[in-house]
Amino acid sequence: MTTIEVDSTQELDIKLHDQIRSILEQKAIEVESTAKRLVASGGGGKTYLKGFVYRKGGKVYAVPGRTTAHTAGIAGGPPSSDTGRLLGSISHSISEGPDGLVARVGSNVPQALYTELGTKLAPAHPWLRPALFAATR
Amino acid sequence: MTVIVPDFMSDARFWLRRQSDLVALRGARVFFRIPPDAIFPLQRIYRTGGGMQQGGGGAPVQDILLSIECWGAAPDSPGATSSNGYDAVRSLVAATESAIWQLPSKTQINPTGQTLVVDAAVTNSIDSPDPDSGSPRYVVDSQWTVIHI
């Protein structure tokens, strides 16, 4: 239970606002942590050896300079971290919008959307929606 | 004791393929993976998350996040017509959301009648055209609670 001591309604407003912001931030951190855990735990799919190829629009490309093997995630499961770029980009923010406090959790790298929703050729490897779902259970 | 959790994805596909409003828009084209020679519009489903409820009784209860993608033909693709593009996808999204919201509690959704839907709700709809092909695509996220009897 949370106890708030106040002397005026204005002070109550401020303290409630701070309290709600704190709870919202805790939830956002929880979602961010779960999302990062999911991305870090992905794997179990096909393994690509050194100099592996990737597909875009049905075409196959070699990746020069690739020095390590990569095991992809299972279709429908979380993505498998390779370079750590997606994992490292997941973050959260709290802002004051016109409708009140807003928490955002996500990533700003292009592959975030590709992995989360998949493409016509590649299955989705959701990592954000399961994290959000887990936080609301 | 081994608990075999029923395959909800197959149950959901079975149910989606029998919704007359949806059949009128995309036939029985509901897939787990889009076939190479697919005719649009179509739907692709996949499970996003969820799992067994803890501490349940004898019948397994699952909370499931199911994504239902609605796909149309890419504007510049050979099979593109005026009736299978973005507008068709929008109609499919509306009909899908409607079918889920109108799903009565305790509906049996699989052929053997062993999967009962306790609750189903649309949680989100995302307009996300395919970055590879440019095909119009909407992702309808839904949350289901089902009991297996």
Image (cartoon, rainbow, N blue to C red):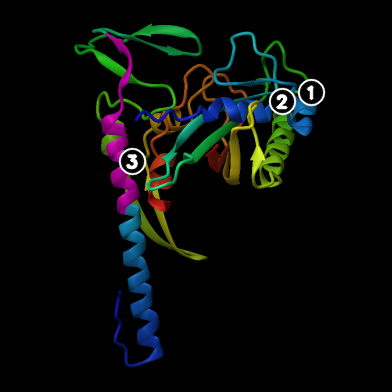
> Do callouts 3 and 2 point to residues on the same chain?
no
Q: Is residue B122 visible?
A: yes
Residues tagged 1 and 2 counted as in contact (Cβ below 8 A)? yes
Tell me which segment is drawn in magenta.
A29-48
Residue B136 visible in the displayed image: no
Instruction: Give residue B86's quadrant in the image.
Output: top right
User: Is A88 positioned to the left or the right of B89 in the image?
Assistant: left
Between marks 3 and 2 in the image, the one whose residue lies nearer the viewer: 3
Q: Which mark is residue A35?
A: 3
Chain of the residue on which disc 3 is drawn: A
Indicate the secondary structure of the residue bearing disc 2. Answer: loop
Q: CA distance from mark 1 to mark 2?
A: 6 Å
Give a yes or no on whether discs 1 and 3 share a subunit: no
Specify the label residue B52 is tagged with.
none
Task: Find the distance from the CA under tag 1 to the CA under tag 3.
Answer: 40 Å
Q: Quadrant of the N terminus of chain A?
A: bottom left
- Is A60 above or below relative to A7? above
Q: Residue at x 69, y 31 (%)?
A: B89
Q: Position of residue B29 (x, y in %)?
A: 68, 20
Residue B75, compared with residue A12, is above or below; it is above
Kind of residue indicated by mark 1: Ser
Q: Disc 1 designates what residue? A: B82
Q: Is residue B28 left or right of residue A16?
A: right
Label 2 sits on what residue type?
Gly
* Residue located 69% across and 46% down the image: B104
